Image (cartoon, rainbow, N blue to C red):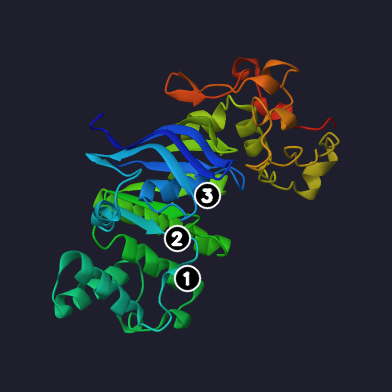
Amino acid sequence: MNPEVLVSVRDLHVSFGSAEAVRGLSFDVRRGEVLAVVGESGAGKSLTARALLGMPPQQATVTGSVRMGPYELVGAPRSVRAALWGHQLALVPQDALSALSPVHRVSDQLAAAVRSVDGASRKEARARATAALEEVGIPADRTGAYPHEFSGGMRQRAVIAMALLHSPALVIADEPTTAQDPETQRRLLDLLTHRTQATGTTLLLITHDLPMVREHADRVLVMYAGRLTEEGPVEKVFTNPRAPYTAGLLTSLPQPKAPRKGRGELRDQPQRTRRRKLPSIPGTPPTPTNLPLGCAFAPRCPLADATRCHTEHPEPQTHNNHTVACHHWHDLPANPADLFLEPV
């Protein structure tokens, strides 16, 4: 395996009976990067993360390969997976309250994690737990509180501290700022990216927040209906998307308003053009039990043809470090956003 690659995912499938939620997904996670995984709900993002952690749902069938160094996680016994948790793999969950025990003090929970992984003494474990919580901005006089005595933002800081306790090689953050206000979201992502960079930890960030991706991530992987749609460096994908689905996601983002003119300036200005309605991708994503033939996005895609797109799934193609799975990636207009804009 390439020494720059920390985790290699090849032909990953996650299914529930006849329903395939992740379908033939292949990608690499590189050492030291922030890789964002985006897509609408139901795209398979969280199931992919669970497969990378070696923690798929009990009723799921996982095939393919998830390799981390010499370890193959798909089909590995629990003893192998448990040996990686903490030192090599860690999770920042979406719901911090469900990840923390309500009947134990937060510092005691972190101390227990230190002792279970590192075998530290009780005194050393408590000192490390307190220091870890202080590093994420929780004052020393609050570290002995119970989870319900923390705000939502503080609980999320606590699980970030827990994930980084052992400086793991890879942290997977699954919608880590959900249900937080915008300012708290920004501070938590700043904290998470800063702390992972400080420890040399690779971060895989699952999110719906595209502006946050542009600010914090190095690369982005776009998923749709369990498959890779587009992947590449953030700026390249955001400024020159090649998949219609990616273009639709980016076009649906609210644009900042232009600064207002002073009264005197308005008299000599030409009449403003009518504002366009904020566009959206028509239709809804398919369910794993009712996937269309061919390209899963074809029923919603303005470029889909009547034959190939509805019968043949597009295989990913890589051009200049930019991967796209679309039959018509070369047919996108100069401004791909125009695909979904309504006429004025």
Report the label total: 3
Q: Residues within 10 Å of mark 3 (few under 14, many from 20)?
A: many
| Nearer to me, 102 or 320 | 102
User: Are the residues flagged by discs 1 and 2 in contact, CB closer than 8 Å?
Assistant: yes
- Identified by mark 2, the residue type is Pro
Give whichever of discs 2 and 3 has the lower sequence position: 2
At mark 1, the secondary structure is helix
The residue at 59%/41% (across/down) is 18
At mark 3, the secondary structure is loop
The residue at 47%/58% (across/down) is 176
**Where does the image place residue 173, in percent across and percent down from the top left?**
43, 54
Q: In this view, does 156 lie to the left or right of 285?
A: left
Q: Residues within 10 Å of mark 2 (few under 14, many from 20)?
A: many
Quarter of the image where one finds residue 100:
bottom left
Q: Does 30 appear above or below 83?
A: above
Give whichever of discs 1 and 2 has the lower sequence position: 2
Q: How crowded is mark 1: few (under 14 residues within 10 Å), some or many (20 or more)?
A: few
Quarter of the image where one finds residue 341:
top right
Residue 98 got which mark?
Answer: 1
- Which image quarter holds the C terminus? top right
Residue 276 in sight here:
yes
Residue 93 got which mark?
Answer: 2
- Disc 3 marks which residue? 207
- Identified by mark 1, the residue type is Ser
At mark 2, the secondary structure is loop
**Where does the image place residue 95, in percent across and percent down from the top left?**
50, 65
Residue 214 in sight here:
no
